[in-house]
Image (cartoon, rainbow, N blue to C red):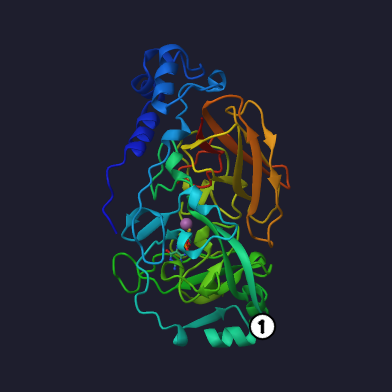
Amino acid sequence: MSDRKPNQPKGLYELYQNDPDHADEKVFGRQSYPDRRGFLKGAGLATMAAVLGGAIPFHRSMPSGIIPAAFAEGLEDVVIEGKDGLTVLNDRPVNAETPPHLLDDDITPTARHFIRNNGLPPTEVDADNWTLTIDGLVEQPMTLTLAQLKSEFEVVTEALLIECGGNGRAFFDPKAKGNQWTYGAVACSQWSGVRLSDMLKKAGVKSGAVYTAHYGADKHLSGQPDKLPISRGVPIEKAMRGDILVAFEQNGEPLHPMNGAPLRLVVPGWPGSCSQKWLTRIEIRDQVHDGPKMTGTAYRVPNRPVAPGEKVAKEDFVIIERMPVKSLITAPQTNSKVSGKQVTIRGHAWSGDRKVASVEVSKNFGATWEKATLNPPVNEGAWQTFTAKVDFPEAGYYEVWAKATDDQGISQPFAIAWNPKGYLNNSYHRIALMVG
Ligand SMILES: Nc1nc2c(c(=O)[nH]1)N[C@H]1C(S)=C(S)[C@@H](COP(=O)(O)O)O[C@H]1N2
Ligand SMILES: [Mo]
């Protein structure tokens, strides 16, 4: 893994987050900011066009203080065995995300599946002797090897979406602590495994069961053997619903070591943290789980909208369940030069536990929207792909924005619904295009 190089685009983000008006002035000159509700004109507009490398035909609807999406990317290629093109945010523990243009496949190749580790992954993994124990509030506690799992339960193969609860945190203002994920802490690989609900039915869940507790074989960063890095769970109703897999294959092969080999949970559409990797035990509890990263403010948001920067009392935080409606533009790559007046836009959209009903794209900073062609998911729990042919009136700098709406009529917001820990940023994805 290479060392992280100083990263100019992140610096720009900081500049804008600390004082957007001043940042506009610094980057594009004094006349660029009559006020935050104003629009770019005069010398500021000319400077921005020069920096972007072309005129901005829709500049009248481009608010000042908005950071051109052309500047939003800071890609670095580093090498993690079996991974390709991921941007490493952290190397102890390893955390790496995938640039949007490398997430273009309907089914995410293992090499492009992000990595989110809270602790130190197990180094010696013996898949043949690995066991999973189900215990707690069940009639028949059981401990099974992978071979037993495969022979005793129906094996299913499904494309399922995993998104980290903190995906998009990098764009919070004020900043939230934690990994500064931009867009790529999301993936939809194809997983093979057995249904957690089948296992729980066989074990016989006792009345009074309320919640699951998931345990994995990774170690706490402190090295203390009795301390767990993370142990989360889901309500028993969710566990019994049939959409959660206990998975031993990823895209037709054993799991990648960083994605939980040899066994993990996949809880589609819920915060990725529910999908315990290096899975060894599932306990059924008579109360909400209280393992590490279940309590306090971890993977929780305030029970009401709060102003950016507002302090929120601990007891006002609620556990995040399904992930919100969201979309990601995967082609063209942001900052591309495209020739011709028509460009095909591609991407994916999802909404945890729901279907996406429509995706729209805008080429003029949200002034007007055009409907994209949206495909159904390949199976429940997978993301949906969309395409849109967008016509550009003349050469110049454009942004393409995407907005998904789910089957409950809920759309992505323009602005982040700010919360102290930086979760659930499902605001529009914007890409920069230079049409030539
Ligand atoms: N045992 C264990 N499971 C874990 C984690 C972890 O640190 N340890 N991280 C969780 C989080 S926060 C996320 S977002 C997903 C990410 O899965 P991936 O690394 O395979 O992409 O794994 C989850 N499962
Ligand atoms: Mo996560």
Tell me the crowding category of disc 1: few under 14, some 14 to 19, or many 20 or more residues within 10 angstroms, Cα based. Answer: some
Give the residue at the far front of this rendering.
340
Where residue 320 appears, as percent x and y from the top left, is: 56, 53
Where residue 34 appears, as percent x and y from the top left, is: 45, 13
Residue at image location 54% in from the left, 60% down from the top: 108
144 relative to 45, above or below: below
Between 142 and 210, the one lying in front of the other is 142
Q: Quadrant of residue 162?
A: bottom right
Q: Badge 1 is on which residue?
A: 202
Please give left or right for residue 242 compared with residue 216 in the image: right
Please give left or right for residue 366 compared with residue 164 in the image: right
Residue at image location 26% in from the left, 53% down from the top: 3
Between 403 and 397, the one lying in front of the other is 397
Where residue 49 appears, as percent x and y from the top left, is: 44, 22
Please give left or right for residue 392 compared with residue 185 in the image: right
336 relative to 355, above or below: above
Q: Does the residue tagged 1 have its C-beta within 8 Å of any atom of ligand 1? A: no
Q: Quadrant of residue 188?
A: bottom right
Q: Is residue 141 visible?
A: no
In the picture, the quarter occupied by the N terminus is: bottom left
Where residue 111 appears, as percent x and y from the top left, is: 46, 63
Q: Quadrant of residue 8?
A: top left
The residue type indicated by label 1 comes to Lys
Q: Is residue 367 visible?
A: yes
Q: How many marks?
A: 1
61 relative to 283, above or below: above
Q: Determine whether the residue tagged by mark 1 lies in a helix, strand or loop.
A: helix
Residue at image location 33% in from the left, 21% down from the top: 26
